[in-house]
Image (cartoon, coloured by chain):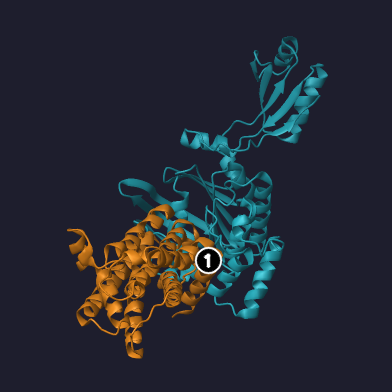
Amino acid sequence: MTSSVITASGLKKSYKDKVVLDGIDLDVQAGSIFSLLGPNGAGKTTTVNLLTTLLAMDGGTARVAGYDVATETKGVRSAIGVTGQFASVDELLTGRENLQLMADLHHLKGDEGRAVVDRLLKRFELVESADKASSTYSGGMRRKLDLAMTLVGRPQIIFLDEPTTGLDPRSRRTMWTIVRELVADGMTIFLTTQYLDEADQLADRIAVLDQGRIVAEGTPEQLKRQIPGGHVRLRFADATQLAAALRVLPESTSDEERLVLRVPSDGGTKSLRALLDRLDEYVVDVEEFTVHMPDLDDVFLALTGHSSDSTNSIDSQTEVTTK
Amino acid sequence: MSTDAAVMLRRNFKHTLRNPITVFNAIFMPIIMMVMFVYVFGDAFNVGGGDYIDYATPGMIMLAISYGLSATAVSVSSDMTKGIINRFKVMDVSRGAVLTGHVVSTMVRVTVAVAAVIGVAFLFGFSPEASFTQWLAAAGVLLLVIFAVSWLTVALGLAAKTVESAGMATVPLIMLPFFSSAIVPADKMGPGIREFAHYQPFTSIIESVRGFLLGAPNTGQTLAAIAWSLAIAVLGYAWARAKFGKRA
């Protein structure tokens, strides 16, 4: 039995005459990772700011951890932690001092505070740099410190606003591991991202936000199922081989210029084995073999009619290359 | 003061000590100005009898106050423009604590600068005639002034859109003492400036402090100084709270 820890209905926010959020509904289950996915300017940060009491909404209602966001800000604030898009660490203080500052503001007494600080430094592998000014930290370290600062208050719900934007691939993976651990500890994560693969990797549920509206919601699998497009792509050494393959696989479409054949497929092992067996039977030599499953980028394109504009989206196709 | 404000104050002290430019601008710059005006140019000024150092010290105190302010505007602005303020807000840190922390740390820093300038003045032969009570009165006026301009500076920092413009916002406060009776009496200035110097707040403040230190209290100017300070404090406080509410 699960329960909702974040619910919102009809959230609206405008800046002057520009509508940023045009009535969005949300429902986040306790102990899950919920991802709000959308390109820059979709309204992700605004949503986080509304839910975390940093901004007042123009319309709609929202409850976080059982407290009304508009009228019970104190209750909301006591239950949440926020790590924003831009690392909010104090650059003139060291890593340890930053954490200690949080402990002091949470009114943790001397020893208890120090113990929490030490534990977090260890957990986030910041012990070595603990006494260096945080301005000398790399982007990944700063983000880790930022998140560690958020955890000092032991929040039930953590809002992560684009936690990996601007990080190198290795730091991103570290951050993903940390996020998974937090959920394993029983926290609820509200994550915004513009990276499709990040939502796919982490989220239990995804809401796709576009121009202030939620255009789709569901599990990553549900979203991917909404659109067809799974196929196997075969590349051949010459036109003769391509023609031979086309005779064997009449349901496919060919691209003669690039010597490529697109065969519709559900990507399952059974159908893939059948396909390969068939090619083998007719002695057709395949240069290159790739399975393309619809990724969230395809979902985005199908749902909104425009691409996500995410330059860093990593194609989630599985490549199996034969010699 | 609330616990939160004390935590913020400690944070601001660390910032000050770790930023050599702040310490230089706030403490050494006024001393350098003092050496320039008193030791280098001093003999050229005719302030109508008495040692120039005795005339100039109250003005130098005012300069020390002004120079100490820009660091506050910059640090308030960088708190607001970098993400840290949002962190404090969602942690439910008491609203005023951030601002109180800045005001108190500014007051402490500026008071240290003023004490340093007075110390150097004594080295240059400053010989005030003030009684103990008059010293206390001068200190009271100065603390009120420091309190007032600290709030004004916090408001300037909050109003600035960027850290750079926050640094520029306090320049008028640094220039004002030069257009007051700090360095030379207002009567000796050109037309236009002379009237401005007569009626601007810093002149009243300087004349009030000068009166006390020279053992000849000037009640009119002291009342004016107190009135100006209260007005600046109220304006600064109200402006700061309004800006803080809006931005955060």
Q: How many marks?
A: 1
Mark 1, Cα crowd under 10 Å, few <14 / some 14-19 / many 20+, is some
* Front-most of residues B14 and B109: B109
Relative horizontal placement of residue B79, taking residue A103 as reference (left or right)? left
Residue A317, above or below A23: above
Please give the name of the residue rendered at 67% of the width and 24% of the height, measured from the top-left corner: A263
Q: Which chain is orange?
A: B
Q: Is residue A197 visible?
A: yes
Outermost residue, bottom side:
B132
Task: Pick the quarter of the image with the N terminus of chain A.
Answer: bottom right
* Front-most of residues A198 and B147: B147
**Regarding mark 1 in the picture, which secondary structure is present there?**
helix
- x, y percent for residue B175: 32, 60
Residue A255, above or below A271: above
- Image quadrant in which you'd find residue B198: bottom left
- Image quadrant in which you'd find residue B168: bottom left
Q: Amino acid at mark 1?
A: His
- x, y percent for residue B90: 47, 65
Q: Is residue A66 visible?
A: no
Please give the name of the residue rendered at 49% of the width and 58% of the height, measured from the top-left corner: B83
Q: Which chain is cyan?
A: A
* Front-most of residues A226 and B219: B219
- x, y percent for residue A49: 44, 57
Relative horizontal placement of residue B211, taking residue A46 as reference (left or right)? left
Outermost residue, top side:
A240
Residue B49, above or below B164: below
Task: Pick the quarter of the image with the C terminus of chain A.
Answer: top right
* Front-most of residues A7 and A198: A198
Identify the residue position indicated by label 1 in the image: B15
- x, y percent for residue A175: 65, 53
Relative horizontal placement of residue A296, taking residue B64 as reference (left or right)? right
